[in-house]
Amino acid sequence: MLENLIVPFDRALRTLTGTVSPTRPTPGERIAEPNLTAHERRDAAGLMRVNHTGEVCAQALYAAQALVARDADVRARYAEAAREEEDHLAWTQARLTELDARPSLLNPLWYAGSFAIGLAAGVAGDRANLGFVVETERQVEDHLTAHIERLPANDTKSRAIVTQMRDDEARHGAMATDAGAVPLPFPIRRAMRAAADVMRAVAYRI
């Protein structure tokens, strides 16, 4: 039980202090820094800040869902997905630095809220918990696709990162489906999308 509590605490500490290291090379790391206008740089930074905040939320969700998962195999799947999400966290953090930008000032709040949501999803049982993962990853795929289209055309470094993130999220959703996820009711899906819209709008600026 003590180990089960230490692991999410350690994850929260590393996530919020920015002390995560990727296990995979950063997509586009060999691409030269594009020549962006001041407006393009601000827009790219805002979008990457949203993506970084999304990864902060992902760490909280997976930590909470693993904590309350009943099945050991489900917990292992969450741990594997969380490790890949740490890559995303490190990649977006590094890209923000390259763009002379900072993460969202509200990341502790986003983390706490997402952890609470993850606990609530897990209480409903493993299959509903997995269904929450499927819907989350589906919505994340949608917003990453929108970001790929919205990023400055010559910001190929950011595009490479977001594209790989989208591919990974699709795999995480498929993992949850294969593990026995059940679809979430429509009102819950709508509430999830509304909450995500608020996060994106705020994190883009703050």
Image (spheres, helix red, strand yellow):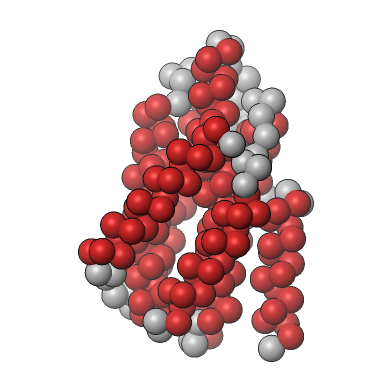
Q: Residue 10 placed where, x, y %?
A: 74, 67
Left/right placement of residue 133 relative to residue 77 reads left
- Residue, x 56% and y 72% (percent of image)? 64
Q: Residue 197 placed where, x, y %?
A: 39, 45
Q: Residue 89 placed where, x, y %?
A: 61, 48
Between 15 and 116, the one lying in front of the other is 116
- Quarter of the N terminus within the rendering: bottom right
Residue 37's place in the image compared with 192, above or below, is above
Residue 12 seen anywhere in this rendered image of the structure: yes
Q: Looking at the image, which residue sits at the far left?
A: 186
Residue 50's place in the image compared with 21, above or below, is above
Residue 83 occupies quadrant: bottom right
- Quarter of the C terminus within the rendering: top right
Q: Residue 169 placed where, x, y %?
A: 44, 54
Residue 190 occupies quadrant: bottom left
- Residue, x 75% and y 51% (percent of image)? 17
Left/right placement of residue 71 relative to residue 92 reads left
Residue 77 seen anywhere in this rendered image of the structure: no
Between 98 and 77, the one lying in front of the other is 98
Q: How many marks?
A: 0
- Residue, x 36% and y 64% (percent of image)? 134
- Residue, x 54% and y 40% (percent of image)? 203
